[in-house]
Amino acid sequence: MKDSVIAAQQTLPGRRTTRDLARAAVSGWLGTAMEFMDFQLYSLAAAIVFNKIFFPDVSPAVGLIAAMATYGVGYVARLAGAVYFGRMGDRIGRKKVLYLTILLMGASTTLIGALPTYAAIGILAPILLVALRLIQGFGAGAEIAGATVLLAEYAPVKRRGLVASLVSLGTNSGTLAASGLWAVLLSVLSEDQLLSWGWRLPFLLSFVLMLFAFWLRRGLKESPVFEERPDVVDGVAMAKDEVESAIATADAHEGSVLAAGIRQRKGRAFFLALGLRFGQAGNSGLVQTFLVGYIATNLAVGRSVPTDAIVYGSLAGFATVPMVGLLGDRFGRRPLYLALTALTAAIAFPVMFLITSGSTAAVMLGMVLGLNVGVLGLFSLESVTMAELFGSRTRFTQLALAKEIGGILATAIGPVLAATLTAVTGSWWPIAAMLVVYSLITFVSALLAPETRGRDLVRLEDAV
C-alpha cells in the first residue's frame, strides 16, 4: 500500500502543468456547456413548439403542462445516472466516466432532432421523445458532477472558486448557445417552417459539439487528487473490506487517515449540499424554463422576447460567474451564499412585476436580473462549495446525487407546479413566491454549513 500523502495536500494540483489545468478547464467547460445546451434546447423546445408537435390534441395550457412534464422526466433518469456513474467515478477515476457521459448525451440529443412527430406516427412520437429524454438524462446525471469534481480537484487551492466556476460558465455558454439558436430560428422562420423542420436543426447540430468534446477528453489526465487518495492503489479505489484490512496493518497515522474516510457517519454534508442546491436548481427551472413558455403564451410581447432575454442574461453571466468565484475565494463561500440568496428573495416580486408589465425592456431587465442573481451567481458558488463539502472517497457520488435529487425536487417539479398554480390562480404571484421559498431554503442551508474555502480535498471524510 502506498504512503499517505495527506501532509502534501495543498500543493497536489501543482503536480499538473498549466497546460494540464487548461485542458481540464476547457474539457469541463465544454462538457458542461454541451449538457446545458442539450437541456436548454429541449426546455425551450418544450416551452415553444413541443406542445404543438407532440401534444397537439389538447388545449394550449394542458399542452404546456404535458411538455413541461416530459421535460421533467429526464431528471428521473439523471438520478439513476448519478448513482451509476458516480460510484464508477469514485472507484476507477473521474476521466473514464466523462468519456461515457458525453457520448450518451450527444447521441440522444441528436436523435431527438430526427424524431417523427405526432402527425406522422401518433402516440408513438411522444413515447420515443420520452425514451430519448431518459437516455439523455442518464448520461447528464453525472456529467456536471464529474466536471465539477475534476476542476475542483485540479485547481490551485487559492483559486479553486474561480477555476471551478468555469463549470458554471459552461452552463452559461450552453444556455447562451441554445437560446441564441432558438432566437435565430424564431426571427428568420415562419411558424409553419419552425413547426415542420426548423425545430430539428439545433438538436442535429449538437452532434458536432459531441465529437469535439470527446476528442478533447482523449488527452485529459486523471484528477491529481484521485491519484493521491490513500485508498487508491494502481488507479482503483479499494473496497471497504480492503480498507479495513489495510487499517489493521498500517501505522497509527495512516490508519487514522483511512479510518476517517470509511467510518465517518454520512448524511449531514449531503443534506446541507442538497439545501444549497435547492435554490439554484429551483430558480433555474422557473427562470430558464417555465418563464420562457409563460411569457410566450400569456404576455402580449413578441415571441422572441423571452429567448432574447435569456441570451442577454447569459452574456451578462460571463462577468457574473467568474466575479462570484473570485469573491468566494476572497471572502469565503458562506458570506456569498447568504448575500445572493437574500438578494434573490428580496427582488423576486419586483422582478416578476417587471416581467409581467408588458414592456419589452422591462421583461428583458427582469429576466437578466433573475438569471444572474438567482441562478448563475448561485451556480458559481455551488460548483466549488459542494465539492469541498464531501470527502474524496465518495465525492463524485454524493455530489452527483445532491445535484440530481435537488434537480428532481426543484427544477423538474417546479415548472410543472408553476404552470399548474398560474393556471389555477390566473396570476404571476405564485412564481415569485416559489422564487422566495427556493432561495430561503438555500439561505438556511448556508447558515448551517461550515466554511469550506481552502479545505484539503484529498481527505477521505466529509467536512461535517
Image: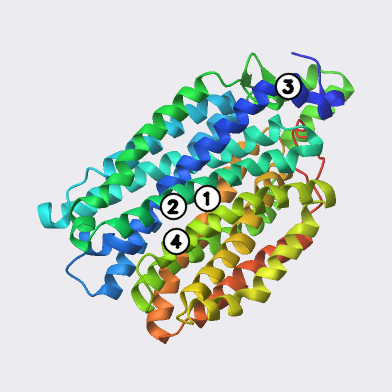
Mark nearer the N terminus (3 vs 2): 2
Marks 2 and 1: in contact by CB < 8 Å?
yes
In the picture, the disc for residue 228 is: 3
Mark nearer the N terminus (1 vs 2): 2
What's the residue at 53%, 67% (across, down)? 367
In the picture, the disc for residue 415 is: none
Percent coordinates x, y for residue 61 in the rendering: 30, 75
The residues bearing labels 4 and 2 have C-alpha atoms spaced at a distance of 26 Å
The local secondary structure at tag 1 comes to: helix
Q: In the figure, is residue 269 to the left or right of 408? A: right
Q: Nearer the viewer, mark 4 or mark 1?
A: 4
Q: Nearer the viewer, mark 4 or mark 3?
A: 4
Of 181 and 298, nearer the camera is 181
Task: Decide: is 190 above or below 223.
Answer: below
Residue at which label 4 appears = 308
Marks 2 and 3: in contact by CB < 8 Å?
no
The local secondary structure at tag 2 comes to: helix
Name the quarter where the N terminus is drawn: top right
The local secondary structure at tag 3 comes to: helix
Question: What amino acid is found at the position of numbered circle 3 in the picture?
Answer: Glu
Question: What amino acid is found at the position of numbered circle 1 in the picture?
Answer: Glu
What's the residue at 56%, 37% (across, down)? 29
Marks 3 and 4: in contact by CB < 8 Å?
no
Percent coordinates x, y for residue 384 in the rendering: 70, 44
Question: What amino acid is found at the position of numbered circle 4 in the picture?
Answer: Asp
The residues bearing labels 3 and 2 have C-alpha atoms spaced at a distance of 33 Å
Q: Residues within 10 Å of mark 2 (few under 14, many from 20)?
A: many
The local secondary structure at tag 4 comes to: helix
Residue at which label 1 appears = 404
Question: What amino acid is found at the position of numbered circle 2 in the picture?
Answer: Tyr
Mark nearer the N terminus (4 vs 3): 3
